[in-house]
Amino acid sequence: VCLIVFPAVFFFACDLKNLPAGERLLAAMFQSVTTRTAGFNTIDISEMSEASKAVMILLMLIGGSPGSTAGGMKTTTFTVLILNAIATFRSQENAGAFGRRLEYHVIKNAATIAMLYFTLFFCGGVAISVYEGLPLLDCLYEAASAVGTVGLTLGVTPGLHVFSQVVLIILMYLGRVGGLTLIYAVLSGRNKGNAKLPLEKITVG
């Protein structure tokens, strides 16, 4: 509900001011939903504000829920990270919700998946921006759409050179298959010994 209502309210307040109130509400709601699922657009996305484009990038990276055909890191991954942050702020040992505790490996996997998606998205966007000489935000938008397998575009992709198109193809493949799946496939069966390295305490944050 939050991922649909809050972005829709934001789009309604910041953009689409040339539309009648009814159409403006429908367009804002549709754009809030489609960025995480279908990838269709009923308005000219390139005319939206940079703030709205940034919100859409975040929505594309989050994606849909597990078991769906939507891409992205998945809503549960994003939720686990939020719950872990809340537990840290409250100095709680375990993260959880609704009277249930989350296992450590679930939080670890969520953090790994999120890091992979953000790394792929950022590196891909920067690479395209440097190579093509285009605004960074536009390139980050295209990269987020690719890694989230959304399909939205600001009209930049058709004019890209082969190198940038290959970058987007790689992002789409990794985003669809899942970076964590590839890592498990390559590294599974290794380092399963019971020995542990000495503990080192460092300061973070």
Image (spheres, rainbow, N blue to C red):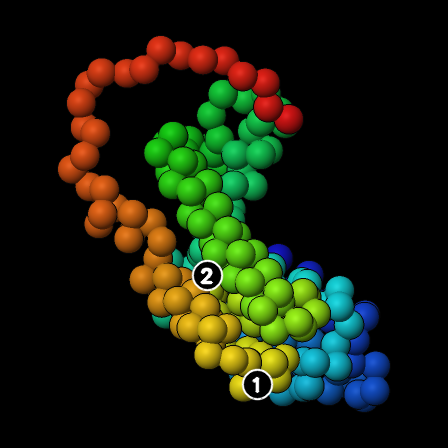
Q: Which numbered tag is attached to residue 159?
A: 1
Mark 2 closeness class: few <14, some 14–19, many ≥20 residues within 10 Å: many
Residue 63, given in percent of the width and then of the height, sits at: 49, 62
Q: Nearer the viewer, residue 101 or 189?
A: 189
Residue depicted at x 57% and y 85%: 159
Mark 1 closeness class: few <14, some 14–19, many ≥20 residues within 10 Å: few
Distance between the alpha carbons at the discs numbered 1 and 2: 25 Å
Q: Is residue 134 left or right of residue 113?
A: right
The kind of residue on which mark 1 rests is Gly
Residue depicted at x 77% and y 72%: 49
Which element is circle 2 on? loop
Q: Nearer the viewer, residue 155 or 74?
A: 155
Residue 41 visible in image: no
Q: Quadrant of the N terminus?
A: bottom right
Question: Quadrant of residue 13 in the image?
Answer: bottom right
Q: Is residue 106 left or right of residue 52?
A: left
Residue 38, given in percent of the width and then of the height, sits at: 48, 77
Question: Quadrant of residue 157 in the image?
Answer: bottom right
Q: Is residue 178 left or right of residue 165?
A: left
Residue depicted at x 38% and y 30%: 104
Residue depicted at x 50% and y 51%: 119
Please say if 179 is above or below 149: above
Please say if 60 is above or below 78: below
Look at the numbered discs 1 and 2 and tell me whether their residues touch, using CB distance below 8 Å. no
Q: Quadrant of the C terminus?
A: top right
The kind of residue on which mark 2 rests is Gly
Of label 1 and label 2, which has the lower sequence position?
2
**How many circles with numbers are drawn on the protein?**
2
Residue picked out by circle 2: 72
Residue 145, given in percent of the width and then of the height, sits at: 52, 70
